[in-house]
Image: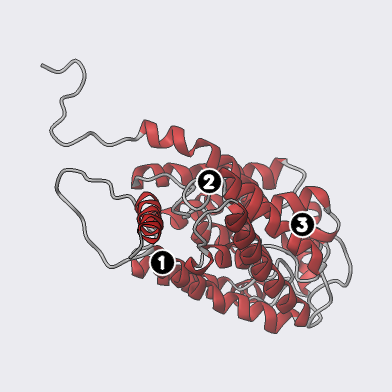
Amino acid sequence: MSPEAKGQTNGKDAKDMQEFKLTVASSPHVRCNETIPKIMWNVVAALVPAAAFGVYYFGVNALVNIIVAIVSAVVFEFLWEKLMHKRVTITDGSAVITGLLLAMCCPPSLPWWMSIVGSFLAIVVCKQAMGGLGYNIFNPAHVGRAGLMVSWPIAMTTWTQLNGTVVDGVAGATPLNVFKHGGTDALFNLFGTNDWGTIYQSLFFGFRNGSLGETSTVLLILGGLWLIYKGYINWQVPVIMIATVGILMGAIYGSANVALFEMMAGGLIIGAFFMATDMVTAPITLKGQMIFALGCGLITVLIRTLGGYPEGVCYSILLMNTLTPLIDRLVKPTVFGAVKKGAK
């Protein structure tokens, strides 16, 4: 091998060693067969049933938005990493999750080019500009959704006619919005019945209007249970967040029916299982995650009852993301063998 080729090889090896630097620490060392791509693709698999139902129920435009959001998210990540001369990581599944979650949290009638804008905000502004996977402090998909909401509020709150249960072209005609502004009478009129059991059935299986992937409660719960089974998320987080909303809304309205309705309507289920449990933007410890979930539930209730929006899950999670470093600091576990300050 020539000296020039050897020098180039050594330079490449040195660069690879810098990118895959190992941190040596004292024992005990924990070993497992989990990898980032394996975890990410399992999350994608957990989301697929609810997304597929959204395509079945809302039609071709829903499928277009899912494809556009995913492809644009992957392309933006690829282009950024190429331009910044970083290792390309589009195969790890994280960009796919971001695009899929973004599409599932938006109306199925959203113009396809808005999905591209949302993916840009999520991948470039929120994720890559902060350093890439593991460094973003906010949930990327919710940043994309929030950006679209403040930029095109009408498009983000307009729903299409399907199966006779959705009001064609009426802005904000979701069950949450109807109940917030019209009460139970307006809600009964929307579903065409005053039987709470029938309304629960529509919310549970997904036959109602709303964002593309948030309608089917049962499929989202099954996906969340899969992640709990795999050990990727702690069950306490979704349970605390959902229960907080249900208990408080039931107490405010003095109705168990309203409590159950508020838990199944809107984006609470998808937010509690798939976004409040984000490994990057949520606290590290279980105690911290429980505090985080409680805060998300409280803020969701405040926005739903006192705010201008009928839904508060997106903003509650983003607001709690800002408190994650503080929560981690407050509940930091004691180092094994350490002596508390002031102890003798």
Number of residues whose C-alpha sits closer than 10 Å to that of mark 1, classed few (under 14), some (14–19) or many (20 or more): some
Query: Does dot 2 land on a helix, a strand or a loop?
Result: loop
- Amino acid identity at mark 1: Ile
Identify the residue at image location x=86%, y=56%.
154
Horizontal and vertical percent for residue 149?
Answer: 77, 52
Identify the residue at image location x=80%, y=73%.
166
> Residue at the left extreme?
344
Residue 177 has which mark?
Answer: 3
Residue 140 has which mark?
Answer: none
Q: Is residue 208 above or below residue 118?
A: below
Number of residues whose C-alpha sits closer than 10 Å to that of mark 2, classed few (under 14), some (14–19) or many (20 or more): few
Query: Does dot 3 land on a helix, a strand or a loop?
Result: helix
Left or right relative to 234: residue 344: left
> Relative to the observer, which residue lies in front, 43 or 226?
43
Estimate the spatial distance between the alpha carbons at disc 2 and disc 3, rounded to whole Å: 37 Å
Identify the residue at image location x=29%, y=50%.
22
Q: Is residue 150 above or below residue 55?
A: above
Q: Which residue is mark 1?
A: 39
Comes first in the chain, label 3 or label 1: 1
> Relative to the observer, which residue lies in front, 68 or 213?
68
Q: Which mark's residue is nearer the viewer, 3 or 1?
A: 1
Comes first in the chain, label 2 or label 3: 2
